[in-house]
Image (cartoon, helix red, strand yellow):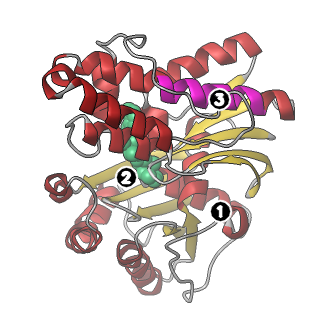
Amino acid sequence: MKVLGIETSCDETAASVIADGTIRSNVIASQAVHETFGGVVPELASRAHHKTIWQTVSQALDEASVTADDVDAIAVTRGPGLMGSLLVGLSFAKGLSISFDKPLIGVNHIDAHMYANFIEHEEVYPFVALIVSGGHTRLVYSDKLFSHKLLGDTRDDAAGEAFDKIGKILGLPYPAGPEVDKRSKNGNPDFHDFPRSMIKKGLDFSFSGLKTSVLYYAQEMGEEFVQKNLDDICASVSAAITDVLTAKLRRAVQQTGVKNVMLAGGVSANSMLRSKMEDLSKKMNLHLMIPSIQYCTDNAAMIAKTGQLKAREGLFDSLEIKPFARLDFLKESS
Ligand code: KG4
Ligand code: ZN
């Protein structure tokens, strides 16, 4: 079974081929155009996808040594994401599907972040997933493929959004998450005690208080102090975010009794989070799944993998499927 995966939900144009469960190519064209604006500009993102999608898909096929005619299905992200960006990928996938007479599979981007774990780990159920991306922070219980129950959600900002917005306050370029992570490695996580909102109870999250706290702290201490102590401040911010994420996952495990846990989404690339999750797993004797770095942030290998799982279950789509900017994966998984 060979599946071509296409991902264009935000600012990465990506294509990948999976063959018999092995990722044969994983091409990502990142859009540098947004850096100067400090965030993704939707119209520019659609244009950049439009410009690069042909070349990205061709490269993914070439690197996998296959042609579009050789694949068994074409999987593409349907949502959630930016409407214009999703439309470019979905229209392109439909064009390929018609031209080469291949079945089409619409994939939920958030499902795909979770199933990225099954590229390198055996498929196991039930599991508890901590989904931490730019737009989502959720705890989910899953007892079988495409069957999820929401355990906890963010009440305001997502974890990735918190990293990005706090990084912006500290003068770091967009997206700030990876840069905060890099600087944290050289800093002292106990330098400043930032708030750990809602850490003591429940499975919901809140990160907007932390953002405000960093803003007030930066204003009070001044630009020179912040820049001089940037590594320590980044480490203290990372500690606050990852302490909350780890505490909530621990609580979800205690409440459900589930031993299989996974990290999913861009923030699962965060080194402090990965290491705290590994420590927690050792202490609680958990089976921990974390994607390797190239499958954490947006990529098409996770779309190809989810496409392969859907094809296995006979879950194909008609050419009439439409993109959804807000796709609730609890309802729209299949
Ligand atoms: O999953 P993703 O690539 O895109 C969405 O679906 O949102 O996640 C992107 C988010 C961004 O907020 C980015 O700053 C964050 O993941 N991120 C990180 C790291 N790498 C990416 N945050 C903290 N540490 C990292 N190493
Ligand atoms: Zn994503």
User: What's the residue type where badge 2 is placed?
Assistant: Ala
State the separation of the CA atoms marked 2 and 1. 30 Å
- Where is residue 312 drawn, in percent x and y? 70, 61
Q: Earlier in the sequence, mark 2 or mark 3?
A: 2
Eyeballing the image, is 73 above or below 236?
A: below
State the separation of the CA atoms marked 2 and 3. 45 Å
Q: Secondary structure at mark 2?
A: loop
Compare residues 196 and 222 and report the one nearer the observer: 222
Q: Which residues are magenta?
A: 240-252
Which residue lies under the disc numbered 1? 329
Which residue lies under the disc numbered 2? 64
User: What's the residue type where badge 1 is placed?
Assistant: Phe
Compare residues 101 and 38 and report the one nearer the observer: 38
User: What's the residue type where badge 3 is placed?
Assistant: Ile
State the separation of the CA atoms marked 3 and 1. 25 Å
Q: Secondary structure at mark 3?
A: loop
Determine if residue 296 is in view.
no
For the point 44% across and 77% down, the residue is 90
